[in-house]
Amino acid sequence: MNIGTYSYEEYVHLVKSFHGSPAPGLLIGGFIVDLALKNLPDGEFFDALCETPVCLPDAVQLLTPCTIGNGWMKILDFGKFAVTLYEKSGGEGVRVYLDAEKLKRWPEVMNWFLKLKTKKEQDSDLLIEQIKEAGHDLLGIQHVRVEPEKLRRRKMGQVSVCPSCGEAYPVKDGDRCRACLGESPYVRE
């Protein structure tokens, strides 16, 4: 059983080194991305769309050239465990998702995903075993068309120096950077 170009065991090792633990969401995410890759036309340049910020973006970045940094991956926080890989210019693609109906065959995965048991109550060894055994059988697939224009990364545009903090920022944000306009997450002391 392979996930992308990796054996299952190699992928688990990669996940541990990247994420810090064999996170169930990242293991399932590997199967999601793998199934999506297997259903894309050969040789196409593609982008990725994750419908959750949790775990799936890591799987996309581990298994494809799509990253947040290069702009080939977008994240929409819909709270759905789904990834779409789509052709950059035309938008034709495939959406793969964790199918809630199929979870019934894998009770520990269902308990984990639907949060029917607390993390303490879960049997993590059984969970990981069921994920490996189920693999692609946990997933649903849809052929979709994405509107690439709606997801295209906006250019930064002209840059200036903020008169308040002295750092560079996009002029389109206003007369000062967004942090100095009150959007900073940092507490002033």
Image (tube, helix red, strand yellow):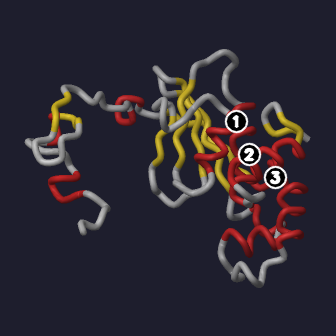
Of the pair 150 and 22, the residue shown nearer to us:
22
Considering the numbered disc 2 on the image, is that residue within a helix, a strand or a loop? helix
Q: Is residue 53 left or right of residue 39?
A: left
On screen, residue 95 above or below 43: below
Camera-nearest label, 1 or 3: 1
Decide: few, some or many residues near mark 1? Use Cα within 10 Å; few <14, some 14-19, many ≥20.
some
Of the pair 61 and 98, the residue shown nearer to us:
61
On screen, residue 186 above or below 171: below
On screen, residue 131 above or below 108: above
Q: Amino acid at mark 3?
A: Asp
Q: Where does the image place residue 128, in percent across and percent down from the top left? A: 84, 62
Decide: few, some or many residues near mark 2? Use Cα within 10 Å; few <14, some 14-19, many ≥20.
many
Instruction: Name the residue at 57% across, 20% down.
Output: 45
Q: Amino acid at mark 1?
A: Leu
Q: Is residue 21 left or right of residue 75?
A: right
Residue 103: image quadrant is: bottom right
Considering the numbered disc 1 on the image, is that residue within a helix, a strand or a loop? helix
Q: Which mark is residue 63?
A: 1
Q: Where does the image place residue 134, in percent across and percent down from the top left? A: 86, 56
Q: Amino acid at mark 2?
A: Gly
Q: Which mark is residue 82?
A: none
Callout 2–callout 1 Cβ contact below 8 Å: yes
Q: Distance from label 3 to label 2 (Cα)?
A: 13 Å
Q: Which mark is residue 137?
A: 3
Camera-nearest label, 3 or 2: 2
Q: Which mark is residue 30?
A: 2
Instruction: Name the residue at 66% across, 15% down.
Output: 43
Q: Quadrant of the C terminus?
A: bottom left
